[in-house]
Amino acid sequence: MKAVAIRAFGGPEKLAVMEMPDPKAARGEILIRTVAAGVNPVDWKMREGGLASLPHAFPLIPGWDVAGVVEDLGEGCHRFRRGERVFAYARKPFVQWGTYAELVVVPEADAAAMPPNLLFEEAAAVPCAALTAMQALAKAGVRKDTKLLILNGSGGVGHFALQLARVAGARTLATTGPKNQEFVMSQGAEAGIDHDRDDLVASVNARFDGGADAVIDAIGGAALERALHAVKPGGIVVSVAGATAAANGIRFERLNSRPSGDELEILAAHAQRKTLRPHVQTIFRLDEAAKAQHESRQGHVRGKLVLAL
């Protein structure tokens, strides 16, 4: 099969199109012929060696998002049929066989049938970011009337978190740049907070008396530190991007999202009802993976980037 992989950690120039052996579906696994693969920040972090502590081997194929067609079924698999359109969060305990490839093997339990109203490129944008958003909202206990602040509301995780929070009936504010103020409001934010010009704490307190009940952080760094002062005592901060020491009775939780076919089915149902819609900023060819990762690393992506095979 054709794939984009690296033979050593480093810059985007390490990514190269290679011929790799076709994977085989073992018991409990399905083989997917990839039509589109999502691009996430974890991909370039992996390529640079930022997650080198995870078990891995070279050549290493990046990518944790896949949408495609079932090519084969391993022993004991019966949820899907050959030729069925599926999507999956293909995160695995051992990092080597990612989704920047023509063929991808995933546990059957981690896949779900694609929503019929989504293109493959749209479906490939969903799994990693939307499952991360869904699990972060659950950990934060977001429900009707929760006062929620989302850091980087225009990004992959952020725009899904806004949509899912709207479904839950929460009130949300989102930080973003000046060009994405209207975008975050179209995704469900009550208002956008300009992360360059606005005082975060004052902006939150102006809308949420006493501060936010919860924060979903998808950016980390200084923004996460500032956000601690915008949370009311007893509130919670859930981060998918950083770590911090909370005080004043504020609880901090770090989230490492996990694959789940069952939760993907819930997201697929939201997509069918049009209460969840991925925003795909740019579609690249597989051989443009380095360009896609470079764009992701700049930190200004609205929604998601996708590779089309």
Image (spheres, grey):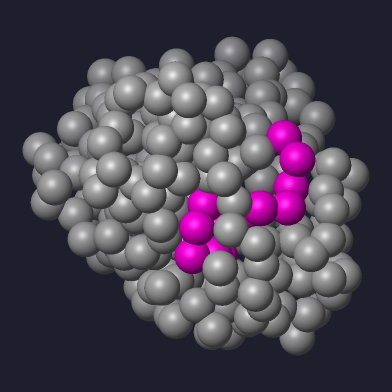
Q: Is residue 217 magenta?
A: no
Q: Is residue 278 left or right of residue 303?
A: left
The residue nearer to you, when weighing 214 against 257, is 257
**In front here: 11 or 77?**
77
Q: Residue at image x 77%, y 71%?
A: 6
- x 83%, y 61%: residue: 58
The stretch of residues the image draws in magenta is: 93-104
Q: How many marks?
A: 0
Is there any visible trace of residue 10 in the rendered image?
Answer: yes
Q: Nearer the viewer, residue 123 or 97?
A: 97
Q: Residue at x 65, y 38 (%)?
A: 92
Question: Residue at image x 53%, y 39%?
Answer: 25
Q: Position of residue 27 (x, y in %)?
A: 55, 26
Give the image quarter of residue 156.
Answer: bottom left
Q: Quadrant of residue 269?
A: top left
**Quick check: can you spot residue 131?**
no
**Could you tell me which quadrant the N terminus lies in?**
bottom right
Toward the viewer: 202 or 154?
154
In the rendered view, tell whether residue 85 sits above or below residue 177: above
- Where residue 104 sits: x, y (%)? 52, 52
Residue 265 position, x and y percent, is 29, 29
x, y percentage for residue 116?
Answer: 13, 47
In the picture, measured across the screen, residue 57 lies left or right of residue 250, that is right
| 274 displayed left or right of 176 | left
